[in-house]
Amino acid sequence: MDRMKQGLMALLLVLGAVRPAGGAATEYKATVTFLKGLARLQGRGNAVTQLALGQTILEGETILTLQNTKVELKLENGTSIRLGPTTSFTLATLQRTPMGGVRGLFKVAKGRLWFTVAKLTGDSDLQTQTPTVVAAVKGTVYRVDAAADGKTDMEVYDGTVATGKPGGALDTPVGANEKLVALPNAAFERGAVDDAEDDKDEWIRWNKSRDKLRIMIILPEKHDNEKAGASISENAAMRRFLNNYLFKVIEKEQADKVRNSDQIKAALKGDAAAAAAAGLEVAADLIIVGEASAKYFKSPALGGLISATANLTARAVRADTAEVIAAMPGLSARAVDITDDAAASKALITAGEKMASEFVDAIITKWKREAKKGAGLDVTVDGVDYKKVKLVTNKLATIEGVRDVQSLYLVGRRSLLNVTFSGDSNGLADRIEAADFGALKVSVVGLSAYKLELEVTGGGALAPEKPAPPVKKNDEEGDVTPSTETPAAVAPAETTTELEEPR
């Protein structure tokens, strides 16, 4: 019995249900889950090394990014912190609290930061500090731009951030869609987030795209056999998806670019591959495509009112694999009102909302199930034509542990493979990096539990990409450290690597 109790206690400690005696805080882990370009890690002893994918960042360490660099960190609770170019970011404090929460202080000397903070519980406390502002959060999406002159721009996209001057009270709340500007020796200035300006900023667009599943919805309508100018059911479905923070709906202007394309026409006839191709054109993760119609009829029993029946069919297709995630072969809704249009609108809204609700549940369930099963690995390959895909596929098939390689599609310069491998994604990534692909250079650019992303360069055939600006030498990079000069420690070729959570 004593051994059983000891074993149970050890298990509970591992799971975090019981904390070490005395309630002392312990170190919390942050992991590098995306790395594009060059970044350096300044350790607690000021030694500087090159930052690497999958590396653990600990309390007291500083990340220094160079030009054209993006870095993402994931905390154990799912919080994402993303660093832009020429950024100096220090994990001043990062600890597990006695009650199982997380306590962190992130210091930003200069640069661009994006925070997607998971909902915090218990005695958790996360704060960000720039030279001119301190921000505390509980579950928020916001970004920080800290200039070399001390000016800080903060924009909040979801939740509320409590802000204040360094050393002062956090008595200035900034809510969703609000902006705060902090200048040295000046009062805070506040305003609204400018979505139009955000859309012009590649850094902001990239961050927004990583936070949500992007969905495009196309549901053309007919009203009493006449084509409708606007789709009531489509708008109703969009609103339903927008109410769930997991999803981002592709803007109507973007959807209109493909709405009348041959791909959508084929998708409406049941071609899932065509639907997926249309989704990829606007960088959608999923596309929902279908048709809706409304018919009216009068009856003396209705006392002069008009009844309308709406019918809707739709399918949700995964853009990267052309897999049908959810399908609704036929859904009907009825409504009664004093006019044809009013009755039809009510019925179509009901149909659109019901379809969207069922699809939201089906999509989330599907993603959770895929994250757990771990059967097979999706491998996306960028920078390829048909010949290069064949070369990569044939080489992958020879790697030890690979039992099967299936090519699922090739759209533009992006291909999707499914690889059956007797191991995990890390093991396959290691073997791909060690493999000889001849004239092709194949790099692992993305890694998650059930997915790899590869980038192929070399081998000719394709038009060359626009060359990236050269990385400056150490004595030309400027001040990228908060306190000490960065030694010429590492200067390899620029790489792109990613490790992301499965959706």
Image: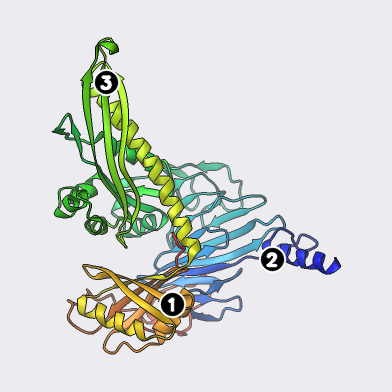
Task: Name the amino acid type tagged 1.
Answer: Phe
Task: Name the amino acid type tagged 3.
Answer: Ser
Task: Name the amino acid type tagged 2.
Answer: Val
Q: Is residue 87 left or right of residue 201?
A: right
Task: Give the CA distance from mark 1 to mark 2.
Answer: 29 Å
User: Could you say where residue 388 lies in the image, as x and y percent from the top left?
Assistant: 24, 80
Question: Which of these two is toward me, 434 or 191?
Answer: 434
What residue is drawn where x is 32% and y is 75%? 455
User: Could you say where residue 64 lies in the image, as x and y percent from the top left?
Assistant: 47, 72
Image quarter (top left, top right, bottom left or bottom right) of the N terminus: bottom right
Query: Mark 3 or mark 2, which is nearer to you?
Result: 3
Question: Which of these two is toward me, 30 or 244?
Answer: 244
Q: Earlier in the sequence, mark 3 or mark 2?
A: 2
Residue tagged by mark 1? 421
Question: Which of these two is toward me, 333 or 122?
Answer: 333
What residue is drawn where x is 28% and y is 75%? 469
Q: Is residue 108 above or below residue 394?
A: above
Q: Earlier in the sequence, mark 1 or mark 3?
A: 3
Q: Residues within 10 Å of mark 3 (few under 14, many from 20)?
A: many
Q: Residues within 10 Å of mark 1 (few under 14, many from 20)?
A: many
Q: Is residue 76 above or below residue 403?
A: above
User: Could you say where residue 215 lies in the image, as x and y percent from the top left?
Assistant: 33, 50
Q: Is residue 120 left or right of residue 113?
A: right
Residue tagged by mark 3? 307
Query: Mark 1 or mark 2, which is nearer to you?
Result: 1
Determine which quarter of the picture holds residue 152. Answer: bottom left
The kind of secondary structure element at disc 2 is: helix
Please tell me the numbered disc located at residue 14: 2
Determine which quarter of the picture holds residue 378. Answer: bottom left
Q: Residues within 10 Å of mark 2 (few under 14, many from 20)?
A: few
